[in-house]
Amino acid sequence: MERGFTLVSLVVALALVALVLAATLPRVARQRDRLACIAARDALIARAERTRSEATRLGSAALIVDPDSARVWWETAGHPRDTLDLRRAFGVDVVQPTGRTLHLAFDRLGIGRFASATIVLARGTEQASVVVSSYGRMAR
């Protein structure tokens, strides 16, 4: 008598594997989207803190968030610096209710001027937001 698997047992095993994968893959994709949004949010907050720091050093600086291109950069004296493409780096989009480019200006004390805003980063069904206070502080 030969040892081995029958065709029926192999088909049943493959069907069980397919069921398990079908049940877990959407959760894995959602988790991956959530982690990408969180990583992008943290990168955005790091850029904002860098902008505030450079404003205290250079006298003023602005954080620019462009929802169309999903890019973030800071600039001083009209010169853009340290550009981050959120779509390329994390696969997220910037969702702005107004759809306009957001300018968060900081003075030499690191205080934001007219900086109140909410920035939403989205990927798939997941979102992460950053709330900017009127003084330029960031909250997760």
Image (spheres, rainbow, N blue to C red):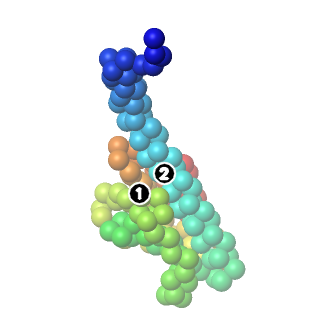
61 relative to 128, above or below:
below
Instruction: Give the numbered dot on residue 36.
Output: 2
Residue with the most extreme right position: 57
Q: Foreground: 62 or 125?
A: 125
The total number of labels drawn is: 2
Would you say 127 lies left or right of 83 here?
left
Instruction: Give the numbered dot on residue 117.
Output: none
* Other residues around mark 2 within 10 Å, as few (<14) / some (14–19) / many (≥20): many
Q: Amino acid at mark 1?
A: Val
Q: Amino acid at mark 2?
A: Ala
70 relative to 79, above or below:
above
Q: Foreground: 37 or 54?
A: 37
Q: Which residue is mark 1?
A: 92
Q: Does residue 43 appear anywhere in the picture? A: yes
Q: Does residue 114 appear anywhere in the picture? A: no
Q: Where's residue 61, x and y in %?
A: 57, 78
* Other residues around mark 1 within 10 Å, as few (<14) / some (14–19) / many (≥20): many
Q: Where's residue 110, x and y in %?
A: 63, 70
Q: Where's residue 9, x and y in %?
A: 37, 17
Marks 1 and 2 close (CB-CB < 8 Å): yes
Q: Of helix, strand and loop, which one carries label 2?
A: helix
Residue with the most extreme front position: 1
Quadrant of image for the N terminus: top left
The image quarter in which residue 111 lies: bottom right
Which is more N-terminal, label 2 or label 1? 2
